[in-house]
Image: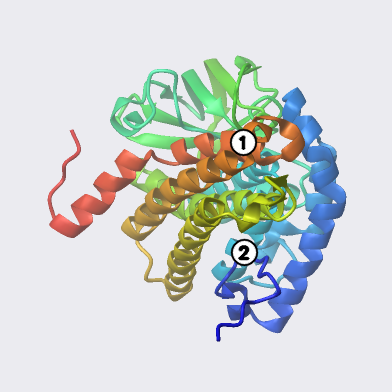
Amino acid sequence: MITMATTANTDSDFFGFEELLTDEERSELAGIREALQREIKPLANEAWERAEFPFETFETFAELGIAGFEFPEYGDGVARRPLFNGFLSVEMNKVDPSLAVASGVHTGLAMGSIYGGGDQHQRDRWMPDMVTWNKIGAFGLTEPEGGSDVAEGMRTTARREGDEWVLHGSKRWIGNGTFADLVVIWARDEFDGNVKGFVVEKDMPGFRASKIEGKIALRSVQNADLWLDHVRVPEENRLQHIENFRDTAKVLARTRGNVAWQALGVAARAYELAREYAVTREQFGKTIGGFQLVQDLLVKMLGNITAMFGMLTRLAQKTAEGTAGPDHAALAKSFTTTRMRECVAWARELFGGNGIVLDYEVAKFFADAEAVYSFEGSREMNTLIVGKSITGQSAFT
């Protein structure tokens, strides 16, 4: 005789990957999770609907010390493992992808560029204020006329004049761009044609930012159009260890792995919302979770999420070992964002008409997934990176 289970497994981490964290890491993660739920979550939906950024979240992020987790010498001195940082990303994105992206732009792209591309003097100059969120960073790579082809087609220029550089051009889709104190701008050197990195401070003459309106995804993120009208930047603001776009690509390879974890967080939260709805919503005299087709949607979501957990756990392990390459990050980003897109669509489908209103929250994750799917390299571009790795032949045109 078959005995049916009477209790439900409500966890999106069905195989218990979090158990690979140490006791200390799980305890710290639990404390952060509680703080995010208490301080950040109550602000998230209203800010998303109004397309405004709740700046008080930076105070919470500063109190938690998360900006220093990957840069321990500027934080609390404790080095967190890549696996822990991945689970932290999942928790932040389950609360709100917009606020997680704003944090990621600051810590991953801006701070990562300065830490990896700057010399020791530049790190010591900017990193302490960025770790404490006293100065907010942004990352200016994408341009109005160039996205995936920006490596070869970058139009923003830099011209050396004595101890200064003159930057001219424009950037688009720059997260935190309307309020950032420091913006890492990538520009092509007119002399040697190589892409170089510069830290532009918001009060420099000729620098202007304008908010992009009408977004359907990550609405709280203040994406901006940036204009640089012959902005004069001192040589001391040029990132000294950036010599060409290959150095820029190292920053992007690292953050692609972070975006893959973000996709997992979005998918996991969509699944959790759908599961909870399925066991409470009644139709035809019983909760819809008792219908086969609804269970099919939930199990497909959970299968995707479990596969994502497995791939990203291994990526984190290889990162810790120093054996993760750009192709590993590219495959992780391509795979997880595709699976995420499936999950949020199935979750929204399960909600029926209730899935298109913010009240049930799944609509936000459904919409935000489209942005996560697109940035940090499209699926197609990441596919070509992996394709070159496994065939030895470049299919880029």
Instruction: Give whichever of 346, 133 is nearer the camera.
Output: 346
Q: Mark 2 is on which residue type?
A: Phe
Question: Dot 2, crowdedness within 10 Å: few (<14), some or many (≥20)?
Answer: many
Residue at 72% x, 49% y is: 285
Helix, strand, or loop for circle 1? Answer: helix
Q: Mark 1 is on which residue type?
A: Gly
Instruction: Give whichever of 53, 46 is nearer the camera.
Output: 46
Q: Position of residue 394 (x, y in %)?
A: 16, 45
Residue 283: quadrant of the picture: top right
State whether residue 185 appears in this view. yes
Residue at 27% x, 49% y is: 385
Q: Earlier in the sequence, mark 1 or mark 2?
A: 2
Q: Position of residue 239 (x, y in %)?
A: 50, 43
Q: Which residue lies under the disc numbered 2? A: 87
Whether residue 5 is situated above or below residue 210 in the rendered picture = below
Q: Position of residue 65 (x, y in %)?
A: 77, 59
Helix, strand, or loop for circle 2? Answer: helix
Q: Which residue lies under the disc numbered 1? A: 352
Q: How is the protein colored in the picture? A: rainbow
What is the quadrant of the N terminus in the image?
bottom right
Which label was assigned to residue 304?
none
Is 274 situated left or right of 170 in this image? right
